[in-house]
Image (cartoon, rainbow, N blue to C red):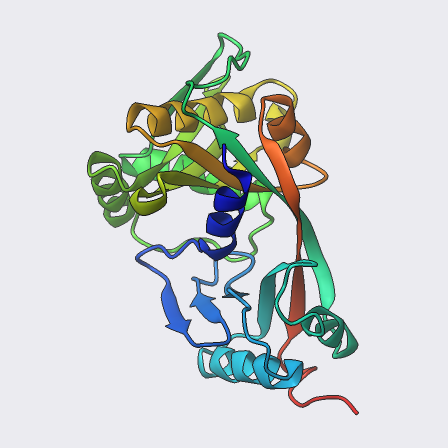
Amino acid sequence: MDVDVVRRAAAVIVWEPDFAEVVRTDAFTLVKYPMWLQQHCQAHRLTSRSPADDVIDAALAQARSWSRDTVWFCGLSSATPNPSLEPRLLERGGHVAETLSVLALDLSEGVPDVPVPDDVSTEPVTTPDLVKAWDAVSDEAFENETPNDEDPDVRARACQEEYDQGRGGVFVTVLDGRPAASGGLTFYPDDRLVLLWGGSSTKAARGRGAYRANLLARLRRAHQLGYAHAVVKGRVTTSAPILTRVGFVDLGQERVVALDIQASSSPST
């Protein structure tokens, strides 16, 4: 695996589902997700070397036009082109919402041998019931306060189409007859890379192999379609240790800083 190539690809890949609104500028990419996602307004690709306050204010202005109250600035690290951006976000009242490890796996030789219990089952989301199962896992794992009110039938058809066309998909794992884990994947053919996202499990299922089963199903799908690398950003306290144990290589850490729009409507002096 060419780590530098994968690292560069991982730095610019952003989850942009059909239901998201995206604004791209020379300074950042801002993604407006539905309110049912905890981090519903995210700034990515923070490549500008302009004054940090100019970048921050532009992102806040766009988020404000979307009636959002918080912006999550993602992908901050020692490699961020503007080293003053993260300190300035913190000075203006931001806080580190989470720390993520960027992890990659070489799939060219196949899928790793991941032990999975016999009493779990995993399948792609293609029906309204599986959509609801996906929501049940995600809402608990990510502490989503606003329920997803999109039509489950519409979402199921979209997931089916995405899966059938080889663009990505979502998998749900069931344990003891109940939704136990879920996770999505999006394919990037130009880089022969698959991005894994949203991997999570319920509290009752943790330590019982449901997360591993879901991970394995997604990796098998990627390998089946000929993808060379899998990339995921995992929380350092939860999923990252599991991922490194099954063979993912840690490419370094990133931080997500959350900034309240109202509290930071103008630069502090």
Q: Position of residue 93 (x, y in %)?
A: 75, 75
The quarter in which the C terminus is drawn is: bottom right
Position of residue 144 relative to residue 124, above or below, is below
Q: Residue at x 60, y 66 (%)?
A: 73
Can the viewer see residue 178 in this picture?
no
Query: Which quadrant of the structure image shows residue 95?
Result: bottom right
Q: Position of residue 151 (x, y in %)?
A: 29, 52
Q: Residue furthest top?
A: 118
Q: Residue at x 38, y 57 (%)?
A: 16
Can the viewer see residue 108 in this picture?
yes
Position of residue 119 relative to residue 9, above or below, is above
Q: Residue at x 40, y 73 (%)?
A: 24
- The answer to whether residue 187 is left or right of residue 117 is left
- The answer to whether residue 39 is left or right of residue 20 is right
Q: Nearer the viewer, residue 215 or 249?
A: 249
- The answer to whether residue 140 is left or right of residue 150 is right
Q: Nearer the viewer, residue 152 or 264?
A: 264
Position of residue 242 relative to residue 89, above or below, is above
Q: Position of residue 205 (x, y in %)?
A: 60, 24
Tally of marks: 0
Q: Residue at x 68, y 36 (%)?
A: 238
Q: Nearer the viewer, residue 125 or 216?
A: 216
Q: Nearer the viewer, residue 33 or 193?
A: 193
Query: Which quadrant of the structure image shows residue 245?
Result: top right
Q: Position of residue 101 (x, y in %)?
A: 64, 43
